Image (spheres, rainbow, N blue to C red):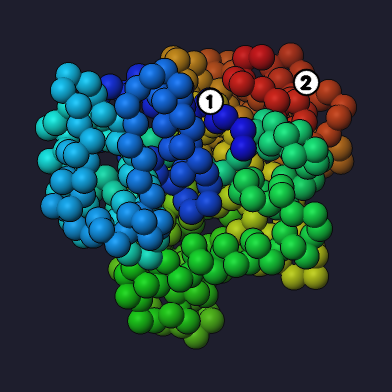
Amino acid sequence: MIIRQHYINQIRPFYDSDLIKVITGIRRCGKSVILSQIAEELRSAGKQVLSINFENIEYSTDICDAMSLVSFVKKHLRANEKLYVFLDEVQLVEGWNLACRSLRLENVSIFITGSNSRLLSGEFTKELSGRYVSFCIRPFVYKEIQEYAKELGKTYSVNDYLIYGGFPKVIEFADKPSVFQYLNDLNQTIVVNDILNRYKIRKTELFKRLVNYILISNARIFSANSVQHYLSSEKLACSLNTVMKYLAYLEEAYVIRKVPQYSTRAKRELAFYAKLYDEDVSFNSVRQKNGRYDLTHNFENIVYNELIFMGYEVFVFNKSGQEIDFLAQKDGKEYLVQAAYSIAEEKTYQREFALFNTLDQSRRKIIITNDDFDYSTSTVRHISFSRFLTMDCLDE
């Protein structure tokens, strides 16, 4: 597996901190791998490391509660030497949060991760009362995919990325049926089983229909009202409060990302009004029928994912009802970014560029498309999708 330096570089300054290092993120995005890579880096530097995976029966039998975990770790402490403790699937230990809060008072640096139906990844930080620093890991972006594919001696095209997404395991399979079997099983585990079990949802059919509607409609503006109206049209009555709860559950499990609007005009307050993106575009693709994949919306979703990876804070930009897909901010710079699968047709070209015409030049304007021809103008920079996927920032 490749070394994911993008994330390790963020965590490294905290190696010696007494704050609990929490590695969060959606299932199967590579959290445990990053944990093991950090542990190996510290071992190579001559540090004392203790790694425990609680899915291993060797540990889970004897370490089942807070007291037994604290006692086990303390047996490995040495005078005047910091112990680096890595706890994988830590939620399997009863009272794990109490144990971690107690151990951080010793000469111990703690790293934890874990996620299943008993404790979703987004809930970890709630259990540690501010005594933590968290790092969210995501599925591969395209640069990471290419690095891993090269390591495996495989190829993974831009179109593969648009359809199958970036879960690391996907690249290991040899054929399309195997990929989709894996993705369907992953979808069932992450999106349905984990959340249904964790929150003891009784209206299972309502929840599943809402989830399908949201994930197949990525890169679109939603309000709680619009979701409720859709469900009502499907003869599934529910309250706005229920819609809000279910959407919050999906966010908690890192299944969706909510992108708020940045508007130059005050908007009336809505219970939920934002653009939603899938954590991985495969959640859209596994819901498509007859092999007709939604490349247009997956394209915009991937542009969002890549911008987040580059470190941009992202909003939907709205001025007087005219919407630009992204306002991307970083290091005091702002970029208006429009994502369009293709602008080769004159009508599409005119529509997409017209969105920029009413805006001043205080922000840099960028349009990203899958076209190879350079459509740049004096005020708008065109970046091809294949080029964008290799960039580390929008200034390149």
Asked if 190 appears above or below 201 in the picture, the reply is: above
- Residue 376 disc label: 2
For residue 5, which numbered disc appears in the image?
1
Is 316 or 387 nearer to us in this picture? 387
The answer to whether residue 150 is above or below residue 291 is above
Q: Nearer the viewer, residue 60 or 143?
A: 60
Q: Disc 2 marks which amino acid?
A: Ser
Q: Position of residue 140 (x, y in %)?
A: 60, 40
Q: Secondary structure at mark 2?
A: loop
Q: Residue at x 32, y 70 (%)?
A: 199
**Rendering coords of residue 340 (x, y %):** 72, 40
Q: Where is residue 16 drawn, in percent x and y? A: 28, 22
In the depicted view, which residue is nearer to us: 228 or 359? 228
Query: Quick one: label 2, few (<14), some, or many (20+) residues within 10 Å?
Result: few
Q: Residue at x 33, y 37 (%)?
A: 50
Three-letter amino acid code at the position of disc 1: Gln
